[in-house]
Image (tube, rainbow, N blue to C red):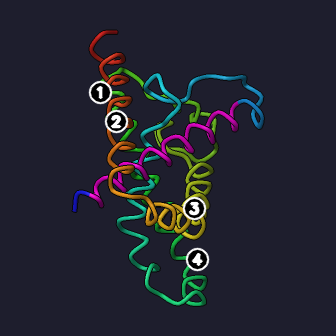
Amino acid sequence: MIRKFEEYLIYFTVYSVMGWLYEVILETFIYGWGFSNRGVLFGPYCPVYGVGALLFIITVNRFIAKKPKIERFKLIPVVFILCMITATFVELAAAYILEYFTGSWPWQTYAGYAINFQARIALSPSIRFGIGGIIILYIIQPYLEKRLLHLRDNALNIIVIIISIVFIADIVCKFVIM
């Protein structure tokens, strides 16, 4: 049980960092807006992506994990829709939570999107999140699970302690000191 929690913390961190990279690449190179730290904390991670990915793993992955490969691929449209809905819900909830605690949320640019709700969620990013969910569940997560399977408990403990210290320090710096 402790190992599973530690693995989830690592998944959360990996997907939070990947989400930050996705946001920075999108803004800097695709939109040409220039670099900005897309996270709500100081470090190179967006926790909302970590939360969304964990929900994909905990809920959606259960539908495909034990199925033969051919059946898994037949379920891609369903996985896409489930991930899209899950991520959109997470993003909407995060926008309300961030607004409550900080007065705003980082993706208010959705106001310019054709189909959006209160600039908190929009169809275009939701579609990208559905695609991202497929990439996570069909490619990245199986790879991560294989890697962690070979990691000894002591090494896993050290990684988790380091991640925890970094996150706690970042949260303290952001919300207590600042």
| Numbered disc in front, either 1 or 3 | 3
Residue that label 2 marks: 96
What's drawn in magenta, residue-wise? 3-27
Discs 3, 4 touching: Cβ within 8 Å: no
Q: Earlier in the sequence, mark 3 or mark 2?
A: 2
> What x and y, as percent, mark residue 30?
77, 37
| Residue in the picture at 70% in, 36% down | 25
Q: Earlier in the sequence, mark 2 or mark 4?
A: 4
Disc 1 secondary structure class: helix
Between 17 and 113, which is closer to the camera in this rendering? Answer: 17
Q: Quarter of the image for the N terminus: give it.
A: bottom left
Dot 1 surroundings within 10 Å: few (below 14), some, or many (20 or more)?
Answer: few
> What x and y, as percent, mark residue 107?
53, 33
Residue that label 3 marks: 140
Predominant SS along the magenta part: helix
Spatial CA distance of label 1 from label 3 is: 33 Å
| Numbered disc in front, either 2 or 4 | 4
Spatial CA distance of label 3 from label 2 is: 29 Å
Disc 3 secondary structure class: helix
Quick check: is 87 in the magenta stretch? no
